[in-house]
Amino acid sequence: MSDIDTLRAALETIDTQGYSPYLLIRGVDAALAPAAPPGDPRTIEMQATAYQAAATQSDSALEDMLKVKTSQLPQSWRGQAAESATQALQALHDWVVANQKALSTGDQTLSQWASQLRTAQQLDEQGHKQLSTMRPLLQQLLLDELISPTVTKADVLVISGLQDAAASACHDRLTAHENAASAADNAIKVLHDYATWAVDDVPVLQAPGIDPLTAIALATDVEGDLPEVTADMRRAAQQLQAMSPTDRTTFENLTASASSPLEASYLWRALGAGYTVKQVQAFDSVIHGRSDKWLTQHLQPAIEDPDRTPGIAHQFNAGTFKSLNIGSSDLTQGSEGDCVAASIATAQMSADPVLTLAATTGQGPAARPLGIATRPGDDSTSATTARLQALYNNYYQAGQIMDQFPDPITNTTNGIGPKGQSLLDAEAFGSTYQQQYLATATAREAVLPKIEAAVDAGKPVPVDVENGVVGHQMVIINHSGNELEVYNPWGSTQWVNEQQFVDSNLGALTDDEHPVVNGRPSPVLNTAFEVQLPT
Amino acid sequence: MKDPPVQSSGSAELFFDPDRFSAAVAGVARAADQIGSAQRQVDHAAGTADDFGAVGPAWSAFHQAWAARADLTTKAADQLTSLLPVAAHAIKSADAGSGTINAASIWSGGPDGTGSDFSVQTSITPIVAPVNGKK
């Protein structure tokens, strides 16, 4: 029985004892049994003060870094190497901001806990003292009653007064323990969240072959204001742990020979995407020595919505590949009915730099004959767009063949069946996926935790929307708080909140378009009727 | 005598001013010192988990995790502090010698890609497929 349960039971005994000194003594003894809420507020405050001092110290470091980053470094050194140094400094700055936030939170949480614990201990001590004081009086009353069993009116008044006092004291102890438990729960939740967040990153940050600055600069992304290890880096670290010593040495040498931290990070990401060390070597032979600008332009679709303006989609008409200024048709399904293939392939590329390289240059271990005439190394808009659309068609046809659709090579209207969907999910995301129908708002609400857990683990979640006449597939690529980030293969990404998802209010994701069916406009695609979830 | 700024000929790609750069290095070194001081503040726990009462195990996990991160941050800051002078030395050496800038090998890559022909395409036509046919 917990201390709180013991005190509740004691209070009940005291309240219902009638005029029996014996029962009252039992109640008081039970109320005296639990120890005070444990802990030393002074030690807790000392720890909080240390966290506060560390956070304050971090403030000074941040001021210096900001000055160097925004003024001293750009004024003294410009060029590609300087840009990399500035990126490393920025990452270090973000990391210190995160440390400062955690330590400030630790300070506030512990300060509050120390104060609440002290108050609870004082109240508990007060109740305990009262109960201890009345215990001998009750003992005397019990003895008197044994000698003279007749209960007088005066006896009743005395016992009644003692009963009230015992109940009040016991209630104080109960309140103290309840308050301490509630305060502890709050503190535990905050500390646990921050500890989990930090500990989750440890396997990556301590992986062999990754030095501290690389870990900070390249293994992390800033989510909100807190940098954390990316899902692909987590997968890469797991791959590395499972490798043979020879492969591990080869990979470590490869990253050590990288001509920039960014190149090294793409080698890690390639490993995280599931490529062998030999394939990563082949990938590196194409990207080695390239500038940071070239790398980001050719290896990262960057389909995220940086604006996060509610109700406004981030359009990729000005170039989805970072700064590459490739035209709008590059990452869209174009005029084909291959929304499933386009959304899946694009989400796959966002976590797979090797496949992205194949699309932008036709080179590397993921490059394969796509039935189109483009020269390897040609990264022009026309060549890139042609390769991307060929890739989508390739997926589209593979999916149709899986479902034994007629004329899969030429059929551009039938879409993808369930078997084709499963094949593409598994091929692209490296996991078995299962479709889940969402017939009601309750079902949509119930599936949200699964969706959010999947995208948090780096697994995109294809989502199908419909209007009762036609359907369309998009892909959920991110989650933050109560919002979901959805990529639409029509060429945009937008954040929507959970309530929009539950309430069938997703039309904004498809620009509130009324799809034309048989020459007539149909309703907006508002309802998510199915998602694909990793099993 | 002060070193003159290094500038690559005919291009604004590379610029290096040793005097101002020294101030930047000093700033990073100062920040690294402060990061180290912050780390030392959290390096030692004020007590045992028992002293923190019911919160003890959660505090212990929090403390270990963030002390480890503070340690990593300190090492990264020290690493950055030591890399900056290496880069400066490489640039100065190159300037005094052949003119080849070796700093790139410390932090950054080589030539940009060629053959790009990037232009914005026309707008797209949204396409959806029948529900019964599945997307």
Image (cartoon, rainbow, N blue to C red):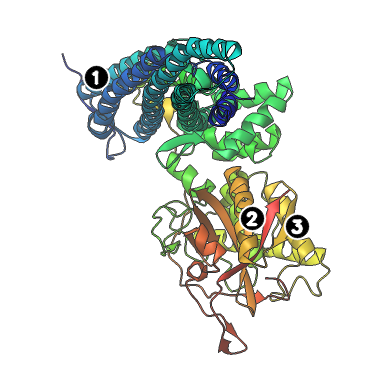
Q: Amino acid at mark 1?
A: Ser
Q: Is residue B26 above or below residue B110?
A: above
Residues at discs 3 and 2 in contact (Cβ within 8 Å): no
Q: Which residue is mark 3?
A: A422
Q: Which residue is mark 1?
A: B22
Helix, strand or loop under label 1: helix
Indicate the quadrant where residue B104 lies: top left
Of residues A62 and A427, the one drawn nearer to the viewer in this rendering: A62
Residue mark closest to the camera, 3 vs 1? 3
Of residues A163 and A397, the one drawn nearer to the viewer in this rendering: A163
Q: Position of residue A130 (x, y in %)?
A: 43, 17
Q: Position of residue B80 (x, y in %)?
A: 38, 21
Q: Is residue B123 visible?
A: yes
Q: Is residue A147 above or below residue A482?
A: above
Q: Which residue is mark 2?
A: A447
Q: Amino acid at mark 2?
A: Val
Residue mark closest to the camera, 3 vs 2? 2
Q: Is residue B48 visible?
A: no
Which label's residue is closer to the chain start, 3 or 2?
3
Inter-mark Cα distance, 3 to 1: 58 Å
Q: Residues within 10 Å of mark 3 (few under 14, many from 20)?
A: many
